[in-house]
Amino acid sequence: MRYPFWPLMCPWARSRLRVSHQSIPETQSSKQPNILRMHIMGDMKLKIKITGDKVHDVGYRYFLMSMAMANRIRMFEAHNTESIDGEEVLAFADGDEEAIESFRASVEAKRPARSKVSNIIFDDFKGDIMKIGEYAQFCATVQLNKAIPLLLDMRDDLQAVRKNTDVIPQVKANTDAIIEEIKGLREDIQPGCSRQMQADVRAIKERLGMS
């Protein structure tokens, strides 16, 4: 019996093949070679909806992307959304069936720190999905867009601090002048105070008959 080997001549088909060998049972002729069986593996697209009280601003999208990369999934994207159920993360993945199933198991079993998940729903998907490398660049752009206002605020704060620092020498000079004036007043006050105290002491002695 002949088996068609034409898919081995096509690069596209070679990437979709999973090859396994199975020996002929010993009841058959021992001279007959092992049969080469080929199983064509189809791609599988998956949609994931994660809802909960806290699934935004905990790194959930990056958490999912890292797990997708670990499972060698080439097509992936995720987005934060809102619904009547609260915060949502929608993720989409496209890969061979084995990789998708492994990724799905990881999503079910693992959570980012500080996240609060109430439900995870898996469903089939038929639309287009970004390449995971393009999605990583998209995420970097989003984070940079968030960082720009913070960097501008930091720049303004540093400029304000610099202006206040320029005033410090003038403040020091004024403080030194005030200290000198206080010293001069103290020297002027001391002689008068001494004479008045002496007069008060003499008056008290006279009243007590001690003079």
Image (cartoon, rainbow, N blue to C red):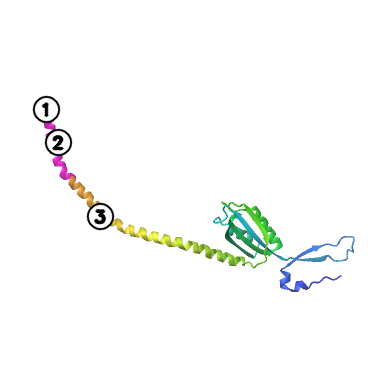
Q: Is residue 30 left or right of residue 208?
A: right
User: Where is residue 120 shown, x and y percent of the image?
Assistant: 64, 55
Q: Residue drawn 63% across and 61% down?
A: 68
* Mark 1 or mark 3, whichever is nearer to me: 1
Residue 130 among those drawn in magenta? no
Residue 122, located in which quarter of the rendered image? Answer: bottom right
Q: Is residue 124 left or right of residue 80?
A: right
* Mark 1 or mark 2, whichever is nearer to me: 1
What segment carries the magenta color?
186-204
Q: Residues within 10 Å of mark 2 (few under 14, many from 20)?
A: few
Label 2 amino acid? Answer: Met
- Label located before the other in sequence (1 or 3): 3
Label 1 amino acid? Answer: Arg
Residue 203 among those drawn in magenta? yes
Answer yes or no: is residue 153 visible: yes
Q: Nearer the viewer, residue 175 or 28?
A: 175
According to the picture, the residue beneath numbered tag 3 turns out to be 173
* Main secondary structure found in the magenta portion: helix
* Vertical arrangement, residue 15 with respect to residue 85, above or below: below
Q: Residues within 10 Å of mark 3 (few under 14, many from 20)?
A: few
Q: Which mark is residue 197?
A: 2
Q: Residue drawn 28% across and 54% down?
A: 171
Q: Residue drawn 21% across and 47% down?
A: 182
Label 3 amino acid? Answer: Ala
User: Where is residue 90 shown, x and y percent of the image?
Assistant: 61, 60
CA separation, marks 2 and 3?
A: 36 Å
User: Where is residue 153 shown, x and y percent of the image?
Assistant: 42, 60
